[in-house]
Amino acid sequence: MVRSRGGWPALAVVLVVGHFFAPFFLLLLRPIKRRAAALGGIALALLVLRWLDLYWLVAPSFHRAELGFDWMDCSALIGVGGVWCGVFLWNLRRCALAPLRDPRYSALLAGGGGDDHE
């Protein structure tokens, strides 16, 4: 019932259009799929929409009267995201980013390309 009044229905429409319809139809276009910047923008938009989706699920319990944002909403996102990025980068240091045990790796570095499996 809380999500049926205030600004919550508008946010629901944004979520439906932004989570499914916009990415679906944008990714049907070949020029967009070939540009890394465009794909990065779509990915960033989907991350923001995912945060809004979680906000839409949780926030009506706290902001009953209407759609509203508090500084704690953004600080929680920054805090959890910062901890996640820190743990990810800490774990990434311990991993090899290249396939060191691949027998074709040295030939690939030398420019030979190794075996081509097309």
Image: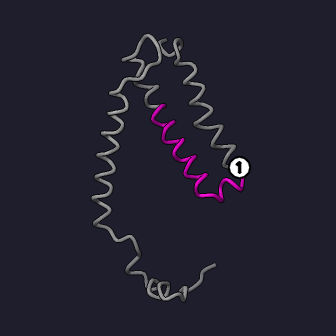
Q: Residues within 10 Å of mark 1 (few under 14, many from 20)?
A: few
Quarter of the C terminus within the rendering = bottom right
The residue that appears at 35% across and 43% down in the rendered structure is: 81
Q: Is residue 29 above or below residue 54?
A: below
Q: Is residue 11 above or below residue 24?
A: above
Percent coordinates x, y for residue 26 in the rendering = 67, 45
Could you tell me residue 7's position as x and y percent? 53, 17
Magenta extent: 29-52
Q: Is residue 35 magenta?
A: yes
Viewed as shown, does residue 80 lie left or right of 99? Answer: left
Q: How many marks?
A: 1
Q: What residue is drawn where x is 50% and y is 16%?
A: 3
The local secondary structure at tag 1 comes to: loop
Residue at left offset 54%, top offset 24%: 11
How is colour applied across the structure in the image? one colour
At label 1, the amino acid type is Leu
- Prevailing secondary structure of the magenta residues: helix
Q: Position of residue 35 (x, y in %)?
A: 63, 58
Height in image: 94 above or below 78? Answer: below
> Camera-side residue: 74 or 96?
74
Q: Position of residue 16 (x, y in %)?
A: 60, 31
Rendering quarter of residue 106: bottom left
- In the displayed structure, would residue 17 be above or below residue 107? above
Task: Give the residue number, with chain letter if any, for mark 1.
Answer: 28
Residue 101 versus residue 43: which sits nearer the camera? Answer: 43
Q: Residue at x 38, y 81 (%)?
A: 101
Magenta-colored stretch includes residue 111: no
